Image (tube, rainbow, N blue to C red):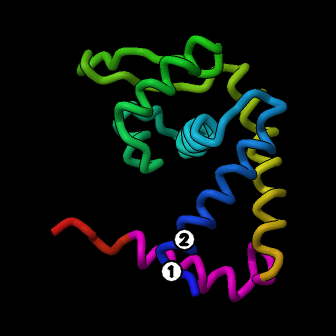
């Protein structure tokens, strides 16, 4: 029998691979999707996040977010600008092209999520809500000594 840690790791890998495959036709990786879709959501909430804020929001390492931001900027999907109040801070914004790429990608990943959660009653099912609560509890549990 597998341990819960092993099962979480396997599910995480299954999800990442599935998202990579689903988004390959539009040229996005799972990490790029997480970056762009998170930026999209933050922009819709009225914020222009810094790279650090986006890293904190996504759970990605700050250096990795910086690397992704440079790549996505070079690809014309993201614009990086220095913060007027603190020039060490880089603010992020989706370009028009970034919106054209990320919006259909979000729909693609939502369909994939629907397929994944179908055995639990779908995205809005009671079992899915219970799983989300349990996973949130685990994510909020500190592991550092």
Residue receiving disc 1? 4
Query: Callout 2: few (<14), some (14-19), or many (20+) C-alpha neighbours within 10 Å?
Result: few
Q: Give how far across and how far down residue 75 sits, in percent.
A: 64, 14
Query: Callout 1: few (<14), some (14-19), or many (20+) C-alpha neighbours within 10 Å?
Result: few
Q: Quadrant of residue 32?
A: top right
Which is more toward the observer, 23 or 53? 23
Which is more toward the observer, 42 or 138? 138
Q: From which residue to which does the magenta span run?
A: 120-139
| Identity of the residue drawn at 42% across and 15% down | 81
Q: Quadrant of residue 140?
A: bottom left
**Left or right of residue 60, residue 100 in this image:** right
Does residue 64 show up magenta in the picture? no
In the rendered structure, find residue 8 and report the number of the disc placed on it: 2
Q: Could you tell me what secondary structure mostly forms the magenta stretch?
A: helix
**Left or right of residue 109, residue 61 in this image:** left
Which is more toward the observer, 22 or 136? 22
| Identity of the residue drawn at 15% across and 69% down | 145
Q: Give how far across and how far down residue 55 sits, in percent.
A: 40, 41
Residue furthest to the front: 1
Quadrant the N terminus occupies:
bottom right
Q: Secondary structure at mark 2?
A: helix
CA distance separating discs 2 and 1:
6 Å
């Amino acid at each position: 029998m597998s341990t819960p840690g092993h099962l979480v790791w396997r599910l995480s890998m299954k999800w990442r691979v599935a998202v990579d495959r689903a988004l390959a036709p539009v040229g996005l990786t799972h990490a790029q999707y997480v970056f762009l879709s998170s930026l999209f959501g933050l922009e819709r909430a009225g914020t222009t996040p810094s790279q650090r804020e986006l890293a904190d929001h996504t759970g990605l390492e700050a250096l990795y977010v910086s690397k992704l931001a440079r790549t996505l900027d070079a690809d014309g999907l993201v614009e990086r600008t220095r913060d007027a109040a603190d020039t060490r801070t880089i603010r992020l914004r989706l370009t028009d092209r970034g919106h054209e790429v990320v919006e259909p990608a979000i729909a693609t990943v939502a369909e994939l999520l629907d397929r994944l959660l179908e055995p639990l009653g779908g995205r809005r099912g009671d079992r899915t809500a219970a799983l989300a609560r349990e996973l949130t509890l685990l994510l909020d549990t500190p592991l550092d000594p």
